[in-house]
Amino acid sequence: MVGLKPSEVPPTTAVKFLGAGTAACFADLFTFPLDTAKVRLQIQGENQAAHVAQSIHYRGVLGTILTMVRTEGPRSPYNGLVAGLQRQMSFASIRIGLYDSVKQFYTPKGSDHSSITTRILAGCTTGAMAVTCAQPTDVVKVRFQASVQLGARSDRKYSGTMDAYRTIAREEGVRGLWKGTLPNVTRNAIVNCGEMVTYDIIKEKLLDYHLFTDNFPCHFVSAFGAGFCATVVASPVDVVKTRYMNSPLGQYRSPLDCMLKMVAQEGPTAFYKGFTPSFLRLGSWNVVMFVTYEQLKRALMKVQMLRESPF
């Protein structure tokens, strides 16, 4: 057995909620530079790109990160980390922590197993709920990740995370904080299905066929498969979401307008810009998050049972 043993008592909703948010923050700390590289690659090629960044060309994941460190300093790959952690604590807690509860809600009474349709419906529901609550944090995170600072020249508009929330609300209205909600709901419904449903099914089959026991190797394989599936199906929507949320006021009329202009100017391959960092990020993020999440659930349940024990 690798890691903590499964608890005899199923984890409570509160344990899943707290565990998911904490595990997601832990995963973000490890993979955030990959996410920043993905954002830079996705917005590269826009006609309205900031003048500061016009002389910079990013090539590949490692090349993007190294270019950022060389031109903007070693802290640049972590631009927007505070907003990223705020996002995960609210976003992942809902979409991952509430997934099992919503799945049970949709499962017909008397049924021993949830169908794939039920799981997809649960994934879409928690993904949409999470975006509705956490969208402002995602907007601020993307703005920071996309901003370039070269010495005295900078296209950064915000002095800090809280200043970003205030400035966006003041200049673009409160609706500006929810900019790109539609493509983000679409993206995260797809990602959540790709991650949660795929992880759920792979883990279930590995255990049913006795290929693994419920421990680290099983969680690792399931999480890696979930990350790959999520990246393949979500990349097109993710690129549109990133560009639309980062765009200045008036550049695009809608997410659909953003998508059509992108295809007209750069071709359909633009939908998979930044695919490698997306996969590296989602794959590694899923592995770290799910492995941590499974262990946190067991640890938190052990603590809860010790507190409730009379001895």
Image (tube, rainbow, N blue to C red):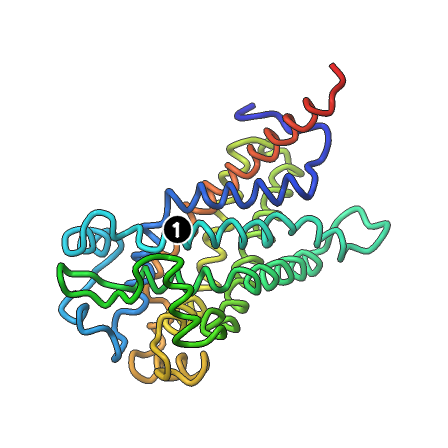
Image side of residue 237 versus residue 262, left or right = right
Q: Residue at x 69, y 61 (%)?
A: 117
Question: Is residue 25 depicted above or below 153 in this figure?
Answer: above
Q: What residue type is labelled 1?
A: Val
Q: Nearer the viewer, residue 306 or 199?
A: 306
Residue that sits furthest to the top in the current view: 311
Q: In this view, does 277 lie to the left or right of 53?
A: right
Determine which quarter of the picture holds residue 268.
bottom left
- Which residue, given by chain and number where applicable, does mark 1 sit on? 82
Residue 89 in picture, x, y percent from top left: 51, 49
Crowding at mark 1 (Cα within 10 Å: few <14, some 14-19, many 20+): some
Q: Which of 49 and 113 is in front in this view?
A: 49
Percent from the top left, x then y, of residue 108? 82, 56
Query: Residue 270 appears at what percent x and percent y?
Result: 33, 72
Q: What element carries label 1?
A: helix
Q: Where is residue 193 in the image (x, y as percent from the top left)?
A: 58, 58
